[in-house]
Amino acid sequence: MHKPHILIIYTGGTIGMVKNADTGALEPLDFNHLRHHLPELRLFDFTIDNYQFTPPLDSSDMTPELWVSLADIIAERYDRYDGFVILHGTDTMSFTASALSFMLEGLNKPVILTGSQLPIGVMRTDGRENLITAIEIAAALTADGQPRVPEVCIFFASHLYRGNRTTKENAEKFNAFASYNYPPLARAGININYQDQLIHRSSGNTQFSINRTLDNRVLALTLFPGIRPELIENVFRMPDIRGIVLRTFGSGNAPTAPWFVDALQQASLSGKVIVNITQCQSGSVEMGLYRTGVMLSRAGVVSGHDMTVESAVTKLMVLFGKGLSAEEVRIQMERSIAGELTIEQ
């Protein structure tokens, strides 16, 4: 019987930190520190290797260049391992999971991101359960020997989520992440209960490859009552910006003032792609529901449906990085590439 071969990629984050006795601040240690506090890793009846970022990274310092490094690490070892577990700080974990879901095309192996709210060396740490269960999920197979969860996911606080559907919702509690518009792929209790019908699987004829070029000339802009015209106009006229994620009200509504509509139209005509997503935690943009949504559509804005801001931003980076035209990007932003949005049939 084939025994799984799992690679743990340690980027840094709270899970591998320890308190500095002099300053009281949390500082990263190396992966051997994690192994010391997790002797349970030796109980797995399969091979677990590790790769470590040097020095370990605070996730607030995550960049598109480091996403490329992560994708390269996976691609270079793709044929040697059955699954990958990425230890990552929680602050930007949803951005990284979203980016990787679009960068790793044709993925048919698990890539599970996890971390913790308390360091692994603390008695009440949540890191032990998160890491051990993430490894189990990365090694899990179906009855016919196929990977159980062949997509990019986040496992945290007993829940397995599609990575590009998540957002960090809590800085204090152990259940740091939520997936408001898509249910968990699995829940871990005494058993790990998978919802197989929810799991995304790449098309069988899609060869695994990575998108290594990301274009970070994008931004996210949150609307609010009283937003100044000059702010909107200056942002939309920025010559180096190619994509704008517009966080609108409710089901995709925005001001109807002529100056706002004109700014949208001019930006769209100049080749910028403007994607409409809601500020609400859950729900979807419906641009044909109210007059304001129709107005946005006529101005060239495309619907982001129920995408998270993390997913919309990183998807734009990947699509522009592929060299697509503005019109091609607009089309792809309204299509599900890696299960990131829900299209009503």
Image: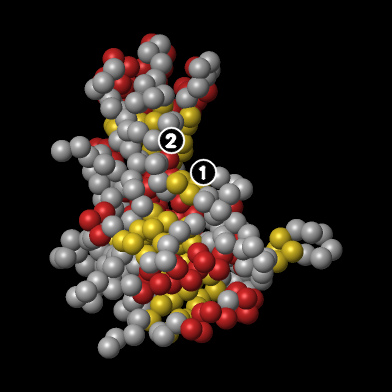
Which circle marks residue 169 in the picture? 1
Residue 123 in sight here = yes
Q: Identify which residue is drawn at 52% across, 66% down.
A: 129
Q: Secondary structure at mark 2?
A: loop
Q: Identify which residue is drawn at 44% across, 76% down.
A: 7
Q: Secondary structure at mark 1?
A: loop
Quadrant of image for the C terminus: top left
Q: Position of residue 271 (x, y in %)?
A: 32, 33
Q: For this view, does 265 lie left or right of residue 220?
A: left
Name the residue at the bottom extreme: 1
Residue 101 in sight here = no
CB within 8 Å, label 2 to label 1: yes
The quarter holding residue 258 reads top left
Mark 1 Cα within 10 Å, few/some/many (few <14, many 20+)? Answer: some
Which circle marks residue 281 in the picture? 2
Q: How many marks?
A: 2
Name the N-terminal-most of marks 2 and 1: 1
Nearest the eye: 40 or 344: 40
Mark 2 Cα within 10 Å, few/some/many (few <14, many 20+)? Answer: some
Q: CA distance from mark 2 to mark 1?
A: 9 Å
Name the residue at the top extreme: 258
Q: Identify which residue is drawn at 42% across, 62% down.
A: 189
| Amino acid type assigned to the residue bearing label 1 in the image | Glu
| Amino acid type assigned to the residue bearing label 2 in the image | Gln
Q: Position of residue 119 (x, y in %)?
A: 64, 64
Q: Height in image: 336 above or below 5? A: above
The quarter holding residue 146 reads bottom left
Q: Identify which residue is drawn at 39% across, 31% down.
A: 278
